[in-house]
């Protein structure tokens, strides 16, 4: 089943009335593994908190049957994302279903990754990390390594734990060693550079930011290129600013203001950290030029408003 088909079934399910739901449930008794029926019914029940028992049963079905399937596990995860806040008992039952799948003999690393997504969506990153660490294939899967590194980085940012940030760095470096393609290598190197900055390992910052930019420039038609140009130049600009090399820092700032179109950058939004640092040091003209340049980029409306607000708040002495 294609994602577009799932989306259409969800749309239909959300519009069902009570009689239609009863009819589908009767069909399901005859065909308990009819996926189209299951998708429609879960879409319906996820919008009706008074149907909590049926809702939980359908979520658990998807976890049991499709825990290792990215598409249908994701569907179940996001349809059950609010259960923690709507009904704690239901959430605990769904959580237990994920743990049960994790502990089955021969459980796939994909199941662990999907379980981690469920815990992450429900704001339990520590459980997400535990789910991934519990699987013996963690260190053999670059996507799982990247996922656990990102979770540990999130935990470190919240807690200020240097131990967690070092652990995240270790997992990112393991992921880099297994990275299967050019895009993965670029993205992982950018993450390593950012973490190295937090750890004041400036040689590692330069090494990975420059290498990420070099790799990205080898395939300028790739979507990751514009993202890398922006992020790497901001990182290198922060690095040179820390060494009080203002001209080079501003040069990197302006290079970061003119990336090629990139869906990844449009979604993630601009990195304004260097602009804020230079602004605090009085370099108003360069920052305004940077923000004006970025405002021409096709960011989401939220990110565009953020740029506009920053420009309006700048006041010259």
Image (cartoon, helix red, strand yellow):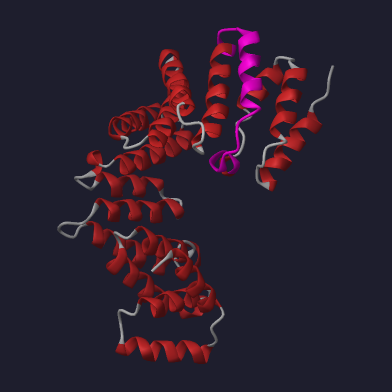
Identity of the residue furthest to the left in this view: 105
For the stretch drawn in magenta, what is the main secondary structure? Answer: helix
Towards the viewer: 175 or 221: 221
Query: Which stretch is magenta?
Result: 241-266
The quarter of the rendered structure image containing the N terminus is bottom left
Give the residue displayed 47% in from the left and 28% down from the top: 216
The reply to whether residue 199 is in sight is no
Horizontal and vertical percent position of residue 200: 45, 16
Q: Position of residue 147 (x, y in %)?
A: 37, 42
**Residue extending furthest toward the top:** 244
Where the C terminus falls, by quadrant?
A: top right
Left or right: where 189 falls relative to 292: left
| Total tally of numbered discs in the picture | 0
Q: Nearer the viewer, residue 97 or 78?
A: 78
Does the magenta portion include 242?
Answer: yes
The image shows residue 6 at horizontal and vertical percentages of: 45, 69
Residue shown at the point (34%, 69%) measured from the top left = 62
186 in the magenta segment: no
The image quadrant that residue 288 belongs to is top right
Residue in the foreground of this view, choosing between 216 and 285: 216
Q: Is residue 223 above or below residue 230?
A: below
Seen in the picture, residue 183 relative to 130 is either above or below; the reply is above
Residue drawn at the location 72% of the way across and 29% of the way down:
293
The residue lying at 54 percent from left, 18 percent from top is: 236
Residue 251 appears in the figure = yes
- 255 on left or right of 39: right
């Amino acid at each position: 089943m294609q994602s577009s088909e799932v989306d259409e079934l969800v749309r239909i399910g959300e519009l069902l009335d009570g009689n239609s739901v009863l009819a589908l449930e009767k069909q399901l008794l005859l065909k308990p593994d009819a996926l189209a029926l299951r998708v429609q019914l879960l879409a319906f029940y996820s919008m009706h908190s008074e149907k909590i028992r049926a809702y939980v049963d359908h979520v658990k079905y998807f976890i049991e049957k499709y825990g290792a399937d990215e598409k249908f596990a994701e569907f179940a995860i996001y349809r059950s994302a609010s259960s923690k806040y709507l009904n704690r008992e239901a959430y605990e039952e769904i959580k237990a279903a994920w743990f049960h799948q994790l502990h089955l003999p021969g459980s796939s690393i994909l199941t662990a990754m999907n379980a981690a997504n469920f815990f992450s969506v429900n704001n339990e990153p520590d459980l997400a990390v535990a789910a991934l660490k519990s699987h013996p294939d963690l260190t053999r899967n670059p996507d799982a390594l990247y996922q656990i590194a990102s979770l540990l980085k999130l935990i470190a940012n919240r807690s200020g734990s240097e131990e967690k940030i070092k652990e995240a760095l270790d997992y990112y470096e393991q992921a880099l060693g297994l990275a299967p393609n050019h895009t993965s290598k670029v993205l992982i190197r950018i993450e390593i550079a950012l973490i190295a900055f937090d750890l004041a390992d400036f040689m590692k910052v330069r090494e990975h930011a420059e290498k990420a930019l070099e790799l990205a420039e080898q395939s300028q038609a790739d979507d990751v290129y514009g993202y890398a140009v922006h992020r790497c130049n901001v990182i290198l600009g922060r690095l040179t600013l820390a060494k009080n090399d203002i001209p080079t820092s501003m040069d990197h700032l302006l290079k970061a203001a003119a990336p090629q179109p990139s869906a990844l950058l449009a979604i993630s939004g601009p990195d304004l950290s260097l602009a804020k640092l230079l602004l605090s040091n009085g370099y108003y003209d360069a920052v305004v030029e940077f923000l004006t340049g970025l405002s021409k980029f096709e960011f989401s409306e939220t990110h565009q408003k953020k740029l506009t607000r920053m420009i309006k708040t700048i006041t010259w002495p």
